[in-house]
Amino acid sequence: MSRQVDLVADLGEGFGDWAMGDDAALLEIVTSANIACGFHAGDPRIMDRTVAECVRRGVRVGAHPSFPDLVGFGRRAMDLTAHEVRTDVVYQLGALMGVAAYHGTRVAHIAPHGRLGNLVAVREDYADAVVDAVSHVDRSLRVLAQDGCLASSARDNGLTVGIVGIADRAYEDDGTLVPRSQPGAVIHDAGEIAARTVRMVTEGVIDSRHGTPILVSVDTVLLHGDTPAAVQLAQRIRAELESAGVTIAAPEARQ
């Protein structure tokens, strides 16, 4: 299994004067960042500050597009058409690309957020809409996804795919995430999360919530920054991965 992994966190998820999580501390730990593009969180000032800090610290910049759902933080289902998904993704990508260009860098990857991120794994029309957006805007973007429709569609269209393992979320037997509305969807025990992450990266296995072993082949680990003690947990995960002989590094940019 992979002995190198990219550590990515969702950052820039505040709005106006309201901030979520300790982005500055997480940027000392991660190698890539999923930056909110204004639809579920973030605004021009926050995007500007977050990209600037990524550049200063050598962290890769990635887009984190969402359903247009500020009130629900992008976690609510919305009855959008595939055309709406495509145009919303293009809009958000364009916004972050402009900020990145201003700071002398580029957007390296895309990782759909929240409910959109869940649905692109199981809905071919949404997955194809995201891939269509990426294919026409910047084919060098790495598409971060779980195994499912988005990963398959991206590969079929010649895009680079990064398979994501989510350290603090419970999995169903089919490899999808347990919905946040259900008990046990988010794992809070730091020791369990760290052990699951190391096993996922080094052995390619994670247990579902029913104890069923699921084969996974991850090259990216997602760390959530909006949970209690997120920074300490991220530090522990990185330390235990490195102790297991895993190299923590972002992949080389594709030209």
Image: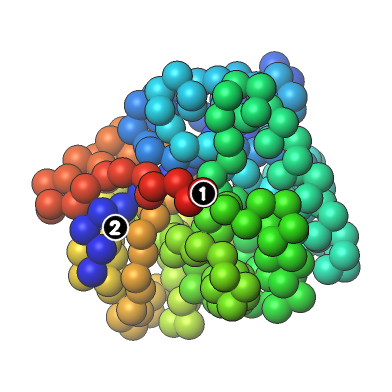
Secondary-structure class at tag 1? loop
Left or right, residue 32 beside residue 79: left
Identify the mark at residue 197; answer none if there is no mark: 2
The numbered mark, 2 or 1, whose residue comes first in the sequence reads 2
Amino acid type indicated by mark 2: Thr
Secondary-structure class at tag 2? helix
Amino acid type indicated by mark 1: Gln
Q: Quadrant of residue 47?
A: top right
The residue that label 1 is drawn on is: 255
- For image coordinates 60% across by 21% down, the residue present is 103
Quadrant containing the N terminus in the rendered view: bottom left
User: What distance separates the C-alpha of mark 2 from that of mark 1?
Assistant: 30 Å
- For image coordinates 45% across by 19% down, the residue present is 56
- For image coordinates 65% across by 38% down, the residue present is 36
How far from the left and from the top, in percent, is residue 243? 11, 46
Identify the mark at residue 1; answer none if there is no mark: none
Q: Nearer the viewer, residue 93 or 238?
A: 93
